[in-house]
Image (cartoon, rainbow, N blue to C red):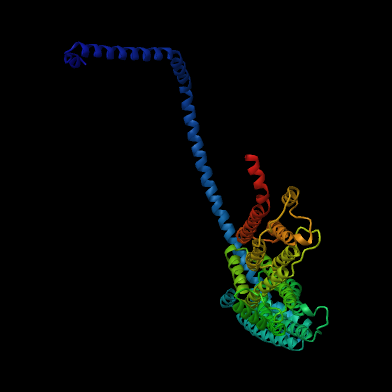
Amino acid sequence: MTNEIQDLTSTEEIKKAYDDLTREEEDCKKELDLLLSRHCQLDAKVRGITKVLPNLQVIHSDSLQLAEMLTFISTLAENVSAKVRQLDNARSRVSECQQRVHDLLDLQLCSDGVTAALASDDYEKAAAHVHRFLTMDQSQLEQTADDMQQDCATVTNSLSLLRTAAGQLQSIITLRFNEAVTAEDFASVERFFKLFPLLNMHDYGLEKFSSFLCSKLEVTALKNLRTAQKTSVSDKRANVIYADTLTLLFEEIARVVEIHQPLVETYYGFGKLHKVVSQLQEECDRQSRLVLTEFCKQRLLERRVALIHELERSTSQPATTAAGIVDPREVDQLLGEVTIMHSRYHLYLRFVRRRVTNDLEVGMTDIAVRTEQQEKLEKMIQDSELCRRMQELLSIYLQLERFYMFQSVNKAVAMDSVEVGSNVSSMVDDIFFIVRKCIRRAASTGNLDGVCAVINNACAALETEVCPALKQQLRLGYPSGYLDLTQAYNVMIQGRLQPSDSEQARNTFLVYLNNADVSCEYVTTLCRGLCQEIPVGSEQERAKLDSCLAGLGTVTASMGAIVDYGLQQLRVSAIKPRVAPWVDTFLS
C-alpha cells in the first residue's frame, strides 16, 4: 500500500486513493460493529459448548458399548440364520424323501390298479392311474431304483408295466373313440374325449373331437341346403331362403361352441378353444362355399352383373335404360337377401372373436403370448374362404345397389308429377326415400366400407341425375308477362302462384325451384341423420365416415347454386321488368 501511495503523482489520483481508503475504513467499521453486536450470542454459545463437553465422554463410552452389542447381535443372528438354512435344507430333503416315498407307493398302486382296470375295461380308472404315473418324476424313480439295494426289480418292473399300459391305453381309447364316431354314439364320444388329456394327448383329443363336430355340422348344413333347394317359389321365405340357410349354418356353429366350450375348458383347460374354433371355421368355409355357390347360381348373380356392365358401357351412364332386361324390383329383393347375409356374417364374427378372446384372457396370463394368439385368430378370420367370398359378394352387392339406386332415381324423375296445391313435385320425396333406403340397407350389413361406397353412389346420383333435371327445367326460364305487385309478393313469400291453365309454365318453374330448395334441406337432414344412425367402432372409422358424408355437403352446394340460378331467372324475367319502369318514373 505504501508503494502504491508513493506512486501517486497527481492530485486526482491522490483524491481517488483517499476515497478508496475511506470506503474501506467504513466497511471495516461496519464489520467490527456487527461482530461486537453478536458478542453476547457468541458468548452464550461458547458457554453452552463448555457445559456439553463433559457429556461427550459419556456419549463416547456408550457408543462403544452399543457397537460391541450390535456386533454380538449380528454374530448371533448369522449363527441363527445358518441354523435356519440348515433346517430348511433338511426340511426340503425330508419333503423330497416323502414325495419319493409317496411316488414309490403310488407307483405300485398304479401298477396294480391299471392292470385290474384294463382287465375290467374300466378306462376312466386306468386313465387316472396312468395320469398319476405321468405326473411323477420318472428320472427320480429310476435313480431310486438304482440306489436301492433291495426291491430294485419291483420299481423297474412297475415303471416298465406302466409305460406299456400307457401306450396300450392310448391305442385303446383312440380305437374306442373312432368306433364311437363311426357309430355316432355321442355319449361314448364325449366319454373318451374326456380321457385324452389324462394321457397327455390334449392336441390329439381336441383335433379328433373337432373333426367329429365338423362331421355333424356338415350333415346339418347339407340338410339345410337341400331344404333350401326344394323350397317353393310361393313360400313366404323364398326371397331370403339362402340367407336363412347361411344364418342356420352360423347359428349351428355358435350352438356347438356354446354347448361344448364348458366341456373343453373343464377337461382341457382354458386357452384351448381357439383350436376347436379353427377347425370349425374350416368346415364353415366349405359349407358356406356350397351355400353361396348355389345362391349365385339360383339368383343369376353373374348374369345380372354382366348385363348391368353391358348397359353401363353402352349408355355411358349407370343403369339408365335397363327396363325389361334387369328388373329393379327383383334386384331390390336380391339386395335385401345379400344384406341379411352380411349382417349375419358380421354377427357370427363378433361371436367368435368374443368367445375366443375371453377364453384366451382367462387361460393365458402372459400378455405377449395372448396377443400372439389373438393375432393368429384375426389372421385365421381374414384368410378364411368365408371372408374372401363375403368380400366378393359385397362387391357384387355394391354394383347391384348402384344399379338399383340410379334406375330408381331416374324412374322417379321420369314419373314426376305435381299434386294440386303442392309446392313441390313427387320426385323430391321419391328420390330421397330411395337414397335413404339404400344407405340404411348398406348400414345394416355392418361393413363401413360398403356404407361409404353407397354414400358415394348417392352423391353421384344426386349430382349427375337430379341436379341436371332440376336445372334443365329452370333453364327454360320464367315466362314473362303481366305480373302485378301482389303476385310478385306471393312469389317471393309463398314460392308459388295460383294455378291456372295460362300459368302452367310459370307454376312448373316455381315447383322446380322449390324442389331444389327442399332438396337442399333434405340433403342436410340426411347427412345429420346418418352421422347419428351409422355405428362406428373407432376414431379412424369416424374420420372415414365423415369424409364420405362431406360429399353430401358438395351436393348441397350444387343444389344451392341451382336455387340461386332459379331466383336469378325469376328476378330477370318476372320482377325486374315490372319494377324497372316504376324506379325510372320515381327517379325522373
**Whether residue 110 can be seen here:** no
Please state the total of marks drawn on the protein image.
0
The answer to whether residue 339 is left or right of residue 61 is right
**Whether residue 490 can be seen here:** yes
Front-most of 467 and 459?
467
Quadrant location of residue 387? bottom right
Q: Residue at x 47, y 30 (%)?
A: 60
Q: Residue at x 79, y 56 (%)?
A: 498
Residue 80 image offset from top left, x and y in percent: 56, 50
Q: Is residue 454 above or below residue 212?
A: above
Residue 204 image offset from top left, x and y in percent: 65, 80
Q: Is residue 69 above or below residue 272?
A: above
Check the picture and name the quadrant holding the C terminus.
Answer: top right
Quadrant location of residue 508? bottom right
Front-most of 1 and 539?
539
Residue 98 image offset from top left, x and y in percent: 64, 67
Check the picture and name the quadrant holding the N terminus.
Answer: top left
Quadrant location of residue 402? bottom right
Front-most of 80 and 519?
519
Residue 398 image offset from top left, x and y in percent: 65, 72
The answer to whether residue 47 is left or right of residue 436 is left
Q: Is residue 67 above or below residue 462?
A: above
